[in-house]
Image: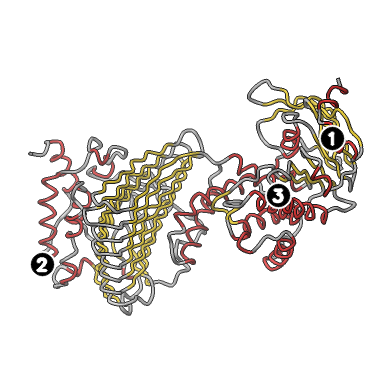
Amino acid sequence: MLEIKNLHVKLEEEDKVILNGVDLKIGPGEVHAIMGPNGSGKSTLSYVLAGREGYEVTEGSATLQGEELLEMEPEARAAAGLFLAFQYPVEIPGVGNMTFLRTAVNAQRKARGEDELSAGDFLKTVRAKAKDLKIDAEMLKRPVNVGFSGGEKKRNEILQMAMLEPRMCILDETDSGLDVDAMKLVSEGVNALRDAGRSFLVITHYQRLLDHIKPDVVHIMAAGRIIKSGGPELALEVEHNGYAALLAEAE
Amino acid sequence: MALAQTKTDALTARTAALTAGGSGWLGAARRDAVARLAAMGLPTKRDEYWRYTDPASLTSATPTPAALFDAGDEAPAFDGIDALKLVFVDGVFDPAQSDDPTLAGVEITSLSQADGVDIHWARDIYGVLETRGQTPVQRPLATLNTAYASEGFLIRATAKAARPISLIYHHTSVTSDALIHHCIKLEKDAELTILENGPAAARVTKVMEVEVADGARFHHIRAQGRDHERRAVTHVFARVGAGALFKSFTLTANGCLTRNEQIIELVGDDGVAHVAGAAVGDGTFHHDDTVFMTHEGQRCESRQVFKKVLMNGAVGVFQGKILVKQGAQKTDGYQISQSLLLDGDSQFLAKPELEIYADDVKCSHGSTSGAIDDTALFYLQSRGVPKRMAQSLLVLAFLAEAIGEIEDEAIAEDIRSRLEGWLQRHEH
């Protein structure tokens, strides 16, 4: 599904290397988690994959189902099936949540050469999916993320994911700012989307989230590289011993 | 103080081809305006009130020629709105293209027919509101218009008008110079919507005087055409009575020079006045909104919402004032002027002012200029929305508060679709 090879990235405006040779391969239907200390490059990896400006890829590649991602505009990556659930979902005053969702869904369909969803079908789908995530009609009407609580913003991200039906979902610290109940709700939303054709990359600081979204593989990232990979037990090890021991081991 | 010779000369040149004729009440109002104009002269860019907008092309003896514009297959603004149409061609009323000017609840008389007739209500408005609006700031171009306006309508609503009146201004001559003056009176509890659309002429000097009596509701929505080279200076003078409503929205897309002045007095208690504008300009575009809102009555609410989208060296100006007079307690005044600069070449000049003499009021004002929010743009793109479409969505979102001032949803949608069209045509 997603294959990252020897990815090196630096900040465009300063000579600061953030990713220093990341290798990662996620198969169809797999759930991978990336854990790592602050500043290890986890969020940067997600932004680079989604196509945010400000980063320069100096070496390496990233492909989604064989297609080179790094050459594409962000919207083309989305149409190709990539989705990033933001750590800090963006507020967009003046754009209604519903308008936003519909524009996004139809733009992707158009890019893939599919017919646009009719207003009726769209409404029916969005209402059903919103209900599962306990997103009420009022939240759908409000401007995108404006005045939403932390939990509402994250649920709104999962709603977008559910509507866009991407193949490769990246969740960037989706658990940050969530209380226990909200985390459960969000996790249920994610788990409902798990299937053989859809893969996940879950970026998190805490093992907690991985109790709800069970990963197949856990990676530890440090200083812009993946230093260790393993099964779910690796996340438990981090939880118990912290990163220090793993970092020392890697050196 | 005697007027500088240069100002006198400029006035002589500007008015050489104009006549302030008439023997009746209108003639008298015109002669009065001629005298007032002689005392103040025409504005120059050295006048404080014209600091950000050079009036030279508005005061020159002849207008700068303005190429005609072909809108292609785009329908004119408000075409789909059921309204009584009154059509002007280069500032001259054209009955052949217009509807029969009869409308239930409304009396409509053309200015050219009004002089010989004693239209008592119009006597109390024509040049009268304009004269009141000369203090504390002189507006000589409005006085010039009162003195020499050749065309316009006197419109009096005595009840709720059956449908809007649509004033349509075609521009067909590259050197046309139009002076249009309307007087509008809404009697107690009457309701009227005036639509205006079109560039009017190569150069247009316009005045609209509006008296909104107690409990009456006035809606004004205008689109100033798409001609790139036209120049316009417009003035709306309004007096708003107790419990009355005045709402005005202006869409300006293109036009190399636009100065829209709105001078509004809330004279009764519990009145409401909202003025809003959305302006989009690319390249040679200078757009100036100048607003003077006076609160005299108690518990009145006023809003000024002006948004400009500027690119490729376009210039936006906002001079807006809220004056709260002594005794105008519980005033609720709001003023926002914002610009979205789509590149580094464009500029926005804002002069927001508050002057408050009452002690129990709520007044806020804000002015900002900035670029499109890159984070929001990336967010939209990451959801699959193409960059151009995402930019348009964000620009429309920026303009939304101003468009939101239009109460009629069909008219608001018309304005929105025009802005969408404009954004599609102008890459940024």
Q: Nearer the viewer, mark 2 or mark 1?
A: 1
Task: Count residues near mark 3 (Cα–Cα under 10 Å), then give few for <14, some for 14-19, many for 20+.
Answer: few
Image side of residue A146 versus residue A165, left or right: left
Q: Amino acid at mark 1?
A: His
Q: Disc 2 vs disc 3: which is toward the camera? A: 3
Would residue B383 appear left or right of A34 to someone viewing this image? left
Residue located beneath label 2 in the image: B24
Residue hosting label 1: A240
Crowd tier of the residue under label 1, counting other residues whose Cα lies within 10 Å: few below 14, some 14–19, many 20 or above: few
**Alpha-carbon span between mark 3 and mark 1:** 21 Å
- Residue at which label 3 appears: A179
Give x and y (percent) for residue B170.
37, 59
State how far apart marks 2 and 3 are (Cα): 79 Å
Residue type, numbered disc 2: Gly
Q: In the rendered structure, the residue with mark 1 lies on which chain? A: A
Instruction: Name the disc covering residue B235, or none.
Output: none
Question: Which residue is farthest front?
Answer: A240
Q: From where the camera sits, is residue B180 visible?
A: no
